[in-house]
Image (spheres, rainbow, N blue to C red):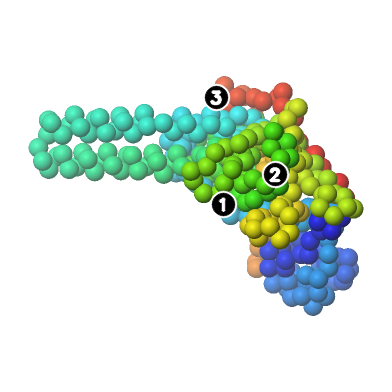
Amino acid sequence: DEEYACCPVIKDCGAATLRHLLKEYIGERNVNKLRTTAQLRAAAKKCKLHERKLKGADALRHRAGIVVSMLSRLERRAPDARAALTNATLERRGQWVVVTKADHEKKEEHKSVNAAEKLEHQLEEKVKKAVQTRAEKRKAFLVANQKAASAGSAISAVDGHDTLLATFEATEKAVDVAFRKRKPITFRMAPFYSGWVEAQGLLIDGVRYCVLAYGSLALFDREAAPRKKLASLKLHGAVVEPKPSDLERNARVEVRRGNRRITLRPPPHGSKYHKKAAALVDMAAILIVAIGHANGSPDIKELEVFRRKGAADDTAAMQPTLKSNVSTPTTPMVRIRAPSPSIESAHSAPATPATPAA
């Protein structure tokens, strides 16, 4: 199906992706001679890789890899895990720990303001200013930390140590220690997308504005506020299935969760909404990554390993004197059995999205 096809965009491809694509055209031996991403991109341009069309599962895997690479650059680091996780709810998703609720209410903020107001009446003017300054700094500190833990984000590192490829037990223990000792913690945001789609399902049939964010898919009647939410679907426990077709405009992507399902595709060509919509292959790739992220899917972990392999190859090329095997991603895999009661388990929901078919 032509709608599930794409040409590689060389500037968006990492080293691992370029190596994978170039093997077919110049052979594995010649690919291994190319050490840096710049050399790989030059070879890709020479053999006109950007004109070669990927189809089916290859196209989806390629576009999904680019989405994962983009997300790796959209991580938020909080200096204090305790402040970041205050009023947040964590839950196990596969081997990941995901923020399911980020109800950062104004409780802490009110405490700071009330304390400052009481001191205003008791202290002199100079002391008042000092207290107000401390209260403002405290409020700013809490807000800065809590913004990092948005709903749907996954804990990607604790105190500088990676957790995306670690076991759940290791991550759970690291989070517990970081919370008690106020260590830094890093969150990888949930995939996001917004644009016009033609939707069928959830009592909707027609062109609607789609917003994918915070681990949820929502459909609205218009793009700008004020707007009405027409339907929504949580991505945890959902599966995605690309549906190619030989008939024109019959290709689509289906998302289902239990007995609820919805199919999406770009608006018709020539409509005023088409220019503001993503191609079907990109729409499907984003949904695959988003649902995999929400469920801690092994498929997404494989894409992350693939991405890191390319980054490690670049590091090895820039440091040729190192004899160690830096091309292998280094990830702490400390296994600790002690469970933490602060992280809820979600074993009942399916954790792996459907694998896209060619």
Residue 357 in picture, x, y percent from top left: 86, 46
Assess whether mark 2 and mark 1 are in contact (beta carbons under 8 angstroms).
no
- How many callouts does the rendering have? 3
| 57 or 220: nearer the viewer | 220
Residue at the image position 83 percent from the left and 75 percent from the top: 47
Is tag 1's residue or tag 2's residue first in the polypeptide sequence? 1
Q: Which residue is mark 2?
A: 206
Q: Is 175 rendered above or below residue 348?
A: below
In the rendered image, the residue lying farthest to the bottom is: 46
The quarter of the picture where the N terminus appears is bottom right
Kind of residue sitting beneath label 1: Leu
In the rendered image, is residue 156 in sight?
no
Q: Which residue is mark 3?
A: 342
Q: CA distance from mark 1 to mark 3?
A: 26 Å
Q: Quadrant of residue 141?
A: top left
Residue mark closest to the camera, 1 vs 3? 1
Residue mark closest to the camera, 2 vs 3? 2
Q: CA distance from mark 2 to mark 3?
A: 43 Å
In the rendered structure, the answer to whether residue 229 lies left or right of residue 182 reads: right
Q: Which residue is mark 1?
A: 74
